[in-house]
Amino acid sequence: MDKLLISGGKPLAGEIRISGAKNSALPILAGTLLVDGKAILSNLPHLHDITTMIELLGCLGVHVVVDENMLVEVDSRPVTGFTAPYDLVKTMRASILVLGPLVARFGEANVSFPGGCQIGSRPVDLHLRGLEMMGATIEIDGGYIRARAPKGLRGSHIFLDTVTVGGTENLMMAASLARGKTVIENAAREPEIVDLAKFINAMGGDVRGAGTDTLTINGVEKLSGGSYRIMPDRIETGTYLAAAAATRGRVKLKDTDPRLLEAVILKLEEAGAEVTQGDDWITLDTKGKRPRAVSLKTAPYPAFPTDMQSQLMTVIAVSEGVGRVIETIFENRLIQAHELNRMGAAISLEGNTAIVTGVEKLKGAPVMASDLRASASLVIAGLVAEGETLVDRIYHIDRGYECIEEKLQQLGADIRRVTS
Ligand code: EPZ
């Protein structure tokens, strides 16, 4: 199994380019099932989760052609199957995103019921309730969600009890082919929602209000195809900024969009880093100084993203002072604290709050990755720590960070992949 071996203690310095956003690319790939024609996608990141979604589309009969630059041509006209099997869904929960498109376009979908994962129980009740309100019948049978709408879906007025990114995406996609108008209230406002809405509109759909908490979707007869470029990955961007802040370094990140990261940038500035930004680049410079501890609380966009919580925890772990990290989205997303403590951090957990007392130094140790973002926090800790850190179970990292060791090497880090 692959591991990452890091010799820490060097400030990161240099420039890298940011990849396309995983959490945009996944719903947009699922959204190609709505298109009665060819969808051409660019800036897809080269990641495990993307390959899994392409494999799932292949299982349904979709033709996918990927060229060497990850320009992907997707043709869902030949779809012959409507089942997302257990084996794929268990490796990637985002497979649930094919549910709305399949039932909206073909009147039939069977998707293995996704279970919980390391970070929480992650129910999908709001996805299912919204589809029922649009006229689908839903049954749970043999571990599968079986959704049917033989006469198509109809527009509806939906209020989401909790802000859900995946739920908003599934229902927005379904509504784009429903008869009439759908209004989704208390919708997620994440940039990935805006990207998906732009994709649907580029294919011929009519989605309005993306980026606000009320979406209005006028269903169209069909989406006929077009081209779309996936937005840059805001979480990858934030992760490299956090790595630079923790190592007292200086980085420039290109091909990104700093406007998507306001809450993260403000925290890093509060920690003492100097941040400069342009339209598609951002720099962070610590001037070699140790960060100051900050406190943060995760919440839906535009507040501080849960997907950046663990990386900032590592920054605070080596800062001067004490910070408090409150996780409000997922019930088990502070677990990286235990591995960080094995490296000499001083973090105590009380319910959904971590109290992080900054230490001067971390010490390298063998550590175990538990989920994607927690793994990133351990890699950052390894970059700061004295001595060697060996991060195990890095398949989690490969799901969401394109060429992480090459990019970190480009920033001067001593990191390599080892097999044992
Ligand atoms: C998306 O997950 C992201 N995944 C996650 O990124 C991210 O952490 C999360 O949004 C929050 O920003 C993708 O985009 C593929 P939710 P999602 O539905 O859509 C509750 C990463 O590391 N809820 O917004 O599954 C749920 O339990 C990943 O890249 C319900 O109660 O998250 C949670 O508490 C991990 N019922 C909250 O809503 C539902 O039907 C937010 O979850 C749906 C969700």
Image (cartoon, rainbow, N blue to C red):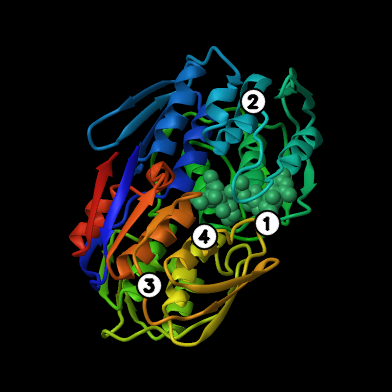
Q: At x 44% / y 71%, what residue is drawn? A: 344
Task: Decide which of tag 1 and tag 2 comes sooner along the chain.
Answer: 2
Q: What residue is pinned by disc 2?
A: 111
* Most foreground residue, 84 or 231: 84
Task: Decide which of tag 1 and tag 4 comes sooner along the chain.
Answer: 1
Task: Measure the alpha-carbon separation of dots 2 and 3.
Answer: 44 Å
Residue type of the residue flagged with mark 3: Leu
From the viewer's perspective, is the residue at label 1 or at label 3 nearer? 3
Residue 404 makes an appearance in the image: no
Task: Measure the alpha-carbon separation of dots 4 and 2.
Answer: 31 Å
Task: Decide which of tag 4 and tag 2 comes sooner along the chain.
Answer: 2
Left-right relation of 277 to 126? left
Q: What residue is pinned by disc 3?
A: 362
From the viewer's perspective, is the residue at label 1 or at label 4 nearer? 4
Badge 2: few (under 14), some or many (20 or more) residues near its Cα, within 10 Å?
A: many
Ligand 1 has an atom within 8 Å of the beta carbon of the residue at disc 2? no
| Label pair 1/4, CB-CB below 8 angstroms | no
From the viewer's perspective, is the residue at label 2 or at label 3 nearer? 3
Q: Element under label 2?
A: strand
Task: Decide which of tag 4 and tag 3 comes sooner along the chain.
Answer: 4
Question: Residue 205's image quarter?
Answer: top right
Task: Measure the alpha-carbon separation of dots 1 and 4.
Answer: 13 Å
Q: What residue is pinned by disc 4?
A: 336
